[in-house]
């Protein structure tokens, strides 16, 4: 990218290219994602920021930088789930699956691969529908469930053919052939490779190095060593020309070339290829591949007739495999811990947010919650009614009894209001606005119906057995009701002001009543029973 600023639409299109195009240069794609994230942040579009962040994290996985990335990917997945962005959530699950693939956790890889398909909806692009099914097939094959994997591969293949996604189909067939080869079904692997080559010829597709690698591995496994050697030399030449998919690519290619040359009896050049592979493994800490290097070294020593050296190499391979298992367990633990910490931090933040929106005495919603939620409710519900309820003569309760008794009265009134409202308007809520004043929100309730409902709640408050708490002092409430439709435009401030006016009228008319529809007039706000 040239760094010029993009608008939201252009930025989204640029992100889609990173999300749905197979890149041969992960480092360059990483730089692109960083720039797109910067621009999304400047635009203030959180959804675009999260998409760019996931693109950047995916490129980090491609280049082998997994430490710390799992937390970022999981954070994006949690954000997408919380904001209903199912396409981004599916892509984040797919990225989580890749992290677990490289940490050796096949079970968690399968779990996230399955979720990456399950959360897809009508917003999913055809690319994503095909690719996520193919990757689920990979994850199933990794666990040995080849029958289930083949079903997903066939589903993805049918979709790709129907929509003419030829490049995607080529990659799908390559992965399928690889896992058939890994599971020992060489005939099936050869048949799939044949279909893949026919597809490439028919549609002018170039076989990239990872695809050539699969072809070379199957050729070597079938004893076609000369063909395998030529395939791997072509593969390495294309890698040298700049096609790099993953950090371990060159080492993997050198290992397969060593096997092909051993099969040809060219043990000298086989050793050269194996030494180059071993050097790459040491430099890049490719521990899983290093296990295969020891095993190939044992076979190479045996081919020379040096069985003592072969046995020593096998022992090295066993030790390396045990070390790998230990490292994989540690990597799995770190990945799961990162995800746990992200979830725990999010839950804790949500807990603190919830506490900040609750009244600590009564447990009701508070004024902060009202200010955050009520404007949206007013905007989308023209039949919404609001009511302001105030405890009558509350100051007298505090003065003649105690503030502790007053608090108990507040708690009990809050319960009666909340229980009464939940019975008739379960989608509504009660909030404490401050002191002895409460707000009741009644969705889809015209003011006439709201008045009747609230009068029943008022009667329940007055009829409660207060004697044990307040002695001879009664506890009643006055309520003012207003419909959002009474004001144009309907706003929180205007509707609360109308409810306030009706509450004042209820106080003036003798308290312990519900009032609505009071005409506008200039009235002093002196009805409060508490000291200011």
Image (cartoon, rainbow, N blue to C red):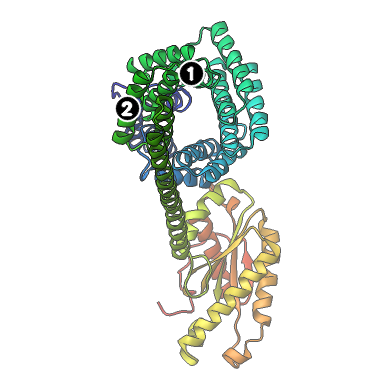
Q: Quadrant of the N terminus?
A: top left
| Residue shown at the point (44%, 47%) measured from the top left | 325
* Foreground residue among 502 and 331: 331
100 displayed left or right of 514: left
Residue 207 position in % (x across, y down): 48, 14
Residue identified by numbered label 1: 216
Above or below for 394 versus 12: below
Residue 333 is at least partly visible in this image: yes
Could you give the CA–CA distance between mark 2 and mark 1, rounded to whole angstroms?
Answer: 19 Å
Q: Does residue 187 lie above or below 46 as drawn?
A: above
How many residues crowd mark 1 within 10 Å: few (<14), some (14–19), many (20+)? many
- Residue with the mark numbered 2: 275
Which residue is found at the position 36% from the left and 24% from the top? Answer: 250
| Rendered location of residue 461, percent (x, y) | 64, 78
In the figure, is residue 524 to the left or right of 119?
Answer: left
The percent position of residue 315, horizontal first and vertical second, equals 41, 42
In this figure, what is the number of numbered marks?
2
Q: Find residue 312 and report its image quarter.
A: top left
Quarter holding the C terminus is: bottom left
* Disc 1 secondary structure class: helix
Mark 2 touches mark 1? (CB < 8 Å): no
């Amino acid at each position: 990218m040239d760094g010029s600023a993009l608008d939201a639409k252009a930025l989204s299109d640029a992100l889609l290219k990173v999300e749905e195009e197979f890149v041969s240069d992960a480092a360059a794609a990483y730089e692109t994602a960083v720039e797109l994230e910067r621009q999304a942040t400047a635009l203030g579009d959180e959804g675009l920021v999260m998409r760019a962040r996931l693109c950047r994290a995916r490129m980090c996985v491609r280049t082998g930088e997994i430490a710390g990335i799992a937390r970022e990917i999981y954070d994006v997945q949690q954000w997408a789930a919380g904001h209903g962005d199912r396409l981004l959530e599916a892509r984040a699950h797919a990225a989580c699956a890749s992290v677990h693939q490289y940490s050796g956790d096949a079970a968690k890889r399968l779990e996230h691969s399955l979720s990456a398909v399950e959360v897809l909806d009508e917003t999913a692009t055809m690319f994503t529908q095909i690719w996520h099914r193919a990757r689920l097939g990979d994850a199933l094959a990794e666990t040995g469930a080849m029958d289930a994997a083949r079903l997903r591969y066939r589903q993805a293949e049918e979709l790709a053919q129907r929509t003419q996604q030829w490049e995607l189909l080529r990659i799908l067939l390559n992965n399928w052939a690889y896992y058939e080869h890994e599971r020992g079904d060489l005939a099936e692997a050869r048949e799939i490779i044949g279909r893949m080559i026919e597809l490439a010829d028919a549609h002018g597709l170039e076989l990239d190095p990872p695809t050539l690698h699969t072809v070379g591995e199957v050729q070597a496994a079938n004893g076609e060593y000369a063909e395998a050697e030529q395939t791997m030399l072509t593969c390495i030449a294309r890698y040298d020309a700049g096609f790099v998919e993953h950090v371990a690519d060159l080492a993997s290619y050198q290992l397969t070339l060593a096997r092909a040359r051993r099969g040809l009896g060219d043990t000298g050049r086989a050793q050269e290829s194996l030494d180059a592979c071993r050097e790459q493994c040491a430099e890049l800490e490719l521990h899983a591949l290093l296990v295969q290097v020891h095993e190939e070294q044992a076979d190479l020593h045996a081919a020379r007739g040096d069985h003592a050296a072969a046995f020593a190499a096998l022992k090295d391979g066993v030790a390396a495999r045990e070390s790998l298992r230990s490292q994989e367990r540690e990597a799995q633990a770190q990945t799961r811990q990162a995800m746990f910490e992200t979830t725990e931090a999010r839950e804790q933040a949500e807990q603190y947010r919830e506490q900040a929106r609750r009244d600590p005495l009564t447990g009701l919603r508070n004024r902060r919650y009202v200010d955050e939620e009520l404007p949206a409710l007013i905007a989308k519900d023209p039949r919404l009614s609001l009511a302001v309820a105030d405890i009558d003569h509350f100051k007298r309760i505090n003065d003649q009894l105690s503030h502790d008794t007053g608090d108990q009265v507040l708690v009990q009134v809050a319960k009666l209001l909340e229980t009464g409202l939940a019975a008739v308007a379960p989608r509504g809520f009660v909030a404490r606005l401050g002191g002895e004043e409460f707000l009741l929100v009644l969705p889809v309730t015209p003011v006439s119906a709201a008045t009747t409902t609230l009068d029943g709640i008022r009667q329940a408050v007055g009829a409660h057995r207060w004697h044990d708490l307040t002695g001879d002092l009664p506890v009643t409430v006055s309520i003012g009701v207003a419909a959002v439709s009474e004001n144009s435009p309907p706003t929180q401030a205007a509707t609360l002001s109308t409810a306030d006016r009706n509450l004042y009228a209820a106080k003036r008319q003798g308290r312990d009543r519900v009032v609505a529809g009071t005409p506008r007039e200039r009235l002093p706000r002196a009805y409060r029973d508490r000291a200011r």
